[in-house]
Amino acid sequence: MTTTKPVRFLTTVLAAAITSAAALTAAPAFAQAVLVAPMAPPPPRAEVMPAPRAGYVWDQGRWRWDHGRYVWVPGRWRPVRVGHRWMPGHWVQRGPNWRWVEGHWA
């Protein structure tokens, strides 16, 4: 007579491991740090947009709040998502502070 307990246990452990791995892999896609700055960002820098690239959209440069000061981050190309439109990130004033709204596909 054989027992199925070890097989059931192994199946349960394997299912739990796969579920945990999927949850850990998906978490960064939904996690988003909230950046808050106590003062308005400087005006955007003039950036020369490179020639268009097929399959990519230009994400303009921006000011990033980093350890108590604004630091310029140059623009970059982002791969196009078919059927979506790129919404650039921007700073929004909330009371006395400024919050960064991350760019996203809509």
Image (cartoon, rainbow, N blue to C red):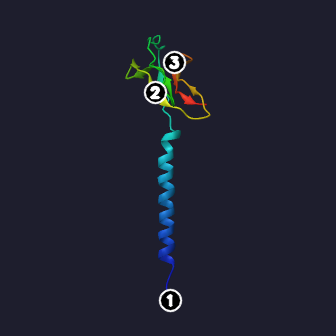
Q: Which mark is residue 77?
A: 2
Q: Nearer the viewer, residue 37 or 20?
A: 20
x, y (%) of residue 91? 52, 19
Instruction: Check if mark 1's residue and mark 2's residue have beta carbons within 8 Å.
Output: no
Q: Sequence order check: which comes first, mark 1 or mark 3? A: 1
Q: Sequence order check: which comes first, mark 3 or mark 2? A: 2
Q: Amino acid at mark 3?
A: Asn
Q: Residues within 10 Å of mark 3 (few under 14, many from 20)?
A: few
Element class at badge 3: strand
Element class at badge 1: loop
Report the residue marked by disc 1: 1
Q: Amino acid at mark 1?
A: Met
Q: Nearer the viewer, residue 23 or 53?
A: 53
Q: Residue at x 50, y 77 (%)?
A: 5
Q: Residue at x 47, y 14 (%)?
A: 41
Q: Sequence order check: which comes first, mark 1 or mark 2? A: 1
Q: Which mark is residue 53?
A: none
Element class at badge 2: strand
Question: Disc 1 to disc 2, how far (Cα)?
Answer: 64 Å
Q: Residues within 10 Å of mark 1 (few under 14, many from 20)?
A: few
